[in-house]
Image: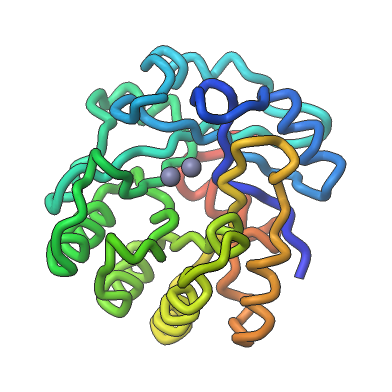
Amino acid sequence: MEFIGDFHTHTCASTHAYSTVSENAKWASEHGIKYLAITDHSIEMEDAPHLWHFYNLRILPDELFGVRLIRGIEANIKDEKGTIDIYEDGLYHCLHWINVSMHYPIMMPSSRKNHTLAYLNVLQNPHVDVICHSESEQYDYDFDLVAKECANQGKLIEINAERLRRGGKAKTRYEYILEACEKYGTGVVVNSDAHFYTAIGAFDSAKQLLTETGFPEKLIFNIDENRILNYLRNKHGNIF
Ligand SMILES: [Zn+2]
Ligand SMILES: [Zn+2]
């Protein structure tokens, strides 16, 4: 199982992250990562860059150090209606990768029912690609319902390598999430959520979990170049 993409990474444009696009891409190129999504926090996060950061991602080269750069964002899920903090249609056209996450205090933890509704509704947004770090216990939800809807909509659930590496209950919660994903044929993507370049592609924790659980490789998005290219081209045309 060789991972060739990392679809959740931050740069110093989010001020609690500390590396540049160039540092990230160089490290990626040296560690077998050929597809790198740059997904800084959307505008309602305290440390988010200005809106112009996202519009201007188009000036980045398509490829740097042999790594394909994918213009992305980590948007905030705000409520049970699945509202996210992307308010201008024009912005969707500048972005090729949209991660969505629940972050405190933008989405206040409430009930399992509300978190489930929020995920089910955000999955109806045609632009959204991945539900990120959803193992968080404070945002508990119905894994079965959400994994099933994710499969229906052809979207992905993230296995966040950093959360797994930190320990705690992440591993157990991801085991349940993977069980639901396998049951419904939901695709997963392993990401670093890197806030410093050395974390990019550091997927050992996730690889171990996927191996231990015998999770089917055909459902792992970022180990197969054709899977990545087909997904991106179906959604955006020939972007590279
Ligand atoms: Zn996040
Ligand atoms: Zn993140």
In which quadrant of the rendered image does the N terminus lie? bottom right
Left/right of residue 125 with respect to residue 50 in the rendered view: left
Q: Measured from the top left, where is residue 40 in percent x and y?
A: 48, 31
Corner quadrant of residue 134: bottom left
Q: Measured from the top left, where is residue 232 in percent x and y?
A: 54, 47
Taking the spot 48% from the left edge, 79% from the top edge, the residue there is 172
Q: Residue furthest front?
A: 168
Looking at this view, is 217 or 230 the one in front? 217
Looking at this view, is 11 or 238 the one in front? 11
Taking the spot 25% from the left edge, 75% from the top edge, the residue there is 142
Q: Residue furthest right?
A: 30
Q: Measured from the top left, where is residue 150 in percent x and y?
A: 35, 66
Numbered-mark total: 0
Residue 29 sits above or below residue 6 on the image = above
Left/right of residue 52 with respect to residue 80 in the rendered view: right
Q: Measured from the top left, where is residue 204 in percent x and y?
A: 73, 64
Taking the spot 66% from the left edge, 85% from the top edge, the residue there is 212
Corner quadrant of residue 140: bottom left
Residue 121 sits above or below residue 195 on the image = below
Left/right of residue 22 with respect to residue 104 in the rendered view: right
In which quadrant of the rendered image does the C terminus lie? top right
> What's the colour scheme?
rainbow
Taking the spot 28% from the left edge, 30% from the top edge, the residue there is 86
Left/right of residue 26 with respect to residue 72 in the rendered view: right
Residue 106 sits above or below residue 216 on the image = above
Residue 158 sits above or below residue 26 on the image = below
